[in-house]
Amino acid sequence: MLYRDALNLALEHALEHDHRVVLLGEDVGFYGGNYKVTEGLYAKYGPKRVIDTPIAENSIVGTAVGMAMMGLRPVAEIMTANFSMLAMDQIVNQMPKLRYMSGGKVFLPLVVRMPQGVAKQLGSQHSQSLEHLFASIPGLYVLCASDAVSAYHVLLYAIRMDDPVLFLEHVLLYGVDFPFEPLEGFDPFRARILREGRDVTVVSYLKMTHDVLKASQWLEEREGISCEVIDLLSLRPIDFETIYGSVKKTKRLVVVYEAPKTLGLGAEVSARVSEELFYFLDAPPLRIAGEEVPIPYNRKLELMAIPTPEKVYAQIVQWGRRHGL
Amino acid sequence: MSFLHEVVFYTLTMSQTLAEKFYYLMKLGREFELRCKEEYLKGNISGFLHLAIGQEAVHVGAVVGFGKGDLFCPYREHVLALARGIEPKLIMAEMFGKVTGVSRGKGGSMHLYEPRLDFYGGNAIVAAHIPHAVGAGYARKLMGEKAGILCILGDGATNNGTFFESLNIASLWEVPVLFLCENNQYAIGTHVSRSSYLKDLFLKARDYMPSVQVDGMDVFEVYRAVIKAKEYIEEYGKPYFIEALTYRFEGHSMADKGDYRSPREIEMFKRRDPLELLLKRSLKEGWLTEEQVRLIDKKVERLVEESVEFAKNSPEPSEEELYSDLYCGVCSDVIP
């Protein structure tokens, strides 16, 4: 099943079973969504529950906040994470604060969905990964999904929650076909171990998880390095328990993410592991991440700016050699 | 009794009831805030404290006139909260940062919430609550409820992009919201003539919805305008805009002396103090007696005193409160 179809299935399931669920965003209704995630839902559930909005990001999230305060369960779509910067007041000052500063009196069963990441030559203003901005804010849940099964289950879980959730998708995953078998008792706050290994724990999420899986295959075949691949579905809170458990076994940590290295999610994961497991480690943690530049248009430069399976492979080999792996 | 006599009699009793209600709420608001100022100077209240002294006619006239319906306010909201019926002692305790406060001591002066009375804050980001009101109105309408939403906003908010986004959406989606702009003429220290191209702020909404300007120092005028607006939004399910011209007698907050305004200007507006206007007129028209006024003043004095005693004697939040109320951690089981 395509990643986008799994998201569509989750939205349809929610709309079908809970009359309080509404969708809103630019082009989500009549047009079917710019990435076709909401296709068919407007025809089936009508314009009152699948709501087209003007290009007014702060008010898209703001009206969704108001709807949630009254007991609806809105799922707002921001066309891309880049545009969510226009809604940062609502995302940072409103969504995470209203429950806390009302002493628990306000409920915000609200999901804000948005895709992020580098696609192909979309230029600096359509290619960012911004998860670390959101994941640094107490009061938000930041969830994401890397394949069809997680997309379906995590999004549905987010809609069921009575707390505000920011749900991140990756633009390059929408058209990818994944095996799809719904699971029982899915827990998005539990990181998934997608590949078991002995030598290195590699933590990743969204599209980078697939690059890591590919690199891990090569590392095993060509170098005999065995990687344990952990896929995060929740970026706030992070499932450190699973990460610590794995690192205690492998004694080595690598974090791979597409955003620029500085102050990214890998900084937090590496720091926590260093604080908690310093004497377990056989090597300093390694971050493989984006370069410190806006994403350029030129394809060669664009690929230089972000991790690729080849770079993940090469950097782990090089780092491993320096540290006795 | 002739028909005309009946009308006059009916109008008179109605004015008496209203005058009594207005005077009680405006006097309570005034005395409560004067006491807040005192407690702030004593160090019992901290942070930003924005007083609505001079603007009580707008707050009381709007809340009483609107009646049932959800209320969304900016940070200058003590009098709005009192008029909505939140107990003075719960507001005072909140300002003292006590766990008995209306927001468990985590909100403070700018963040008073009481959803049981349809009171949704208290927002400290200018214009941020306007889309909340629009979304709330959409939700109420979708759920088949009629009451509508009252959204109070300041003159400064009308220069913000989110304000225009929300006006557009409210009209486009036909949402039952009354936007009430209290124009006290100053965005902190900047006069409206130096921040807004349009000097009459109600003109900003006129292309989107019915929009009027009223004297915000006359509680009856605010009340009548709000009643009319409420009838409109309930009948048509569409938004409405009122600009109420008013003035704040104090600085923007306790941190601001307000001395960018000439003493002459302040004096001129104080001559139209909304509380005194109401009192003079009520006594003259026979809507209130001296004895009634004395009793109300006494009741207000007692309530304010009790609220401070309650706040002082209330406990501090426990250490567990630091992390409580951040997430509710509950999942709806409606979706299988």
Image (tube, coloured by chain):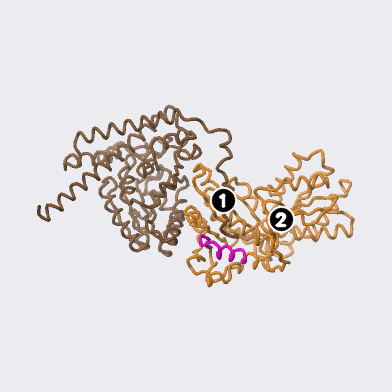
Chain colours: A orange, B brown
Q: State the image coordinates of residue B188 (x, y, percent, origin top left).
A: 41, 42
> In the rendered view, does B268 fall on the left or right side of A308?
left
The three-letter code of the residue at mark 1 reads Asp
Screen quadrant of the N terminus of chain A? bottom right
| Helix, strand or loop under label 2 | loop
Q: Position of residue B241 (x, y in %)?
A: 35, 56
Q: Nearer the viewer, residue A239 or A295?
A: A239
For this view, does A200 lie left or right of residue A68? right
Q: Is the residue B98 above or below the residue A160 in the image?
A: above
Location of mark 1 (residue): A163
Q: Quadrant of residue A302?
A: bottom right
Is B323 situated left or right of A120 in this image? left
Question: Which one is earlier in the sequence, the residue at label 2 or at label 1?
Answer: 1
Foreground residue among B140 and B271: B140
Residue B206 in view: yes
| Same chain assignment for discs 2 and 1 | yes
Mark number displayed over residue A205: 2
The residue shown at (49%, 64%) is: A54
- x then y, percent, for residue B309: 40, 28
**Height in image: B239 above or below A250?**
below
Left/right of residue B160 with respect to residue A145 in the rendered view = left
Mark in the foreground, 2 or 1: 1
- Disc 1 element: loop
At label 2, the amino acid type is Tyr
| Image point (43%, 43%), residue name | B75
**Residue nearest the observer in this picture, B157 or A51:** A51
Is disc 2 surrounded by few (<14), some (14 to 19) or many (20+) residues within 10 Å? Answer: many
State the predominant SS element of the stretch in magenta. Answer: helix
Task: Name the chain letter of the residue that bears numbered label 1.
Answer: A
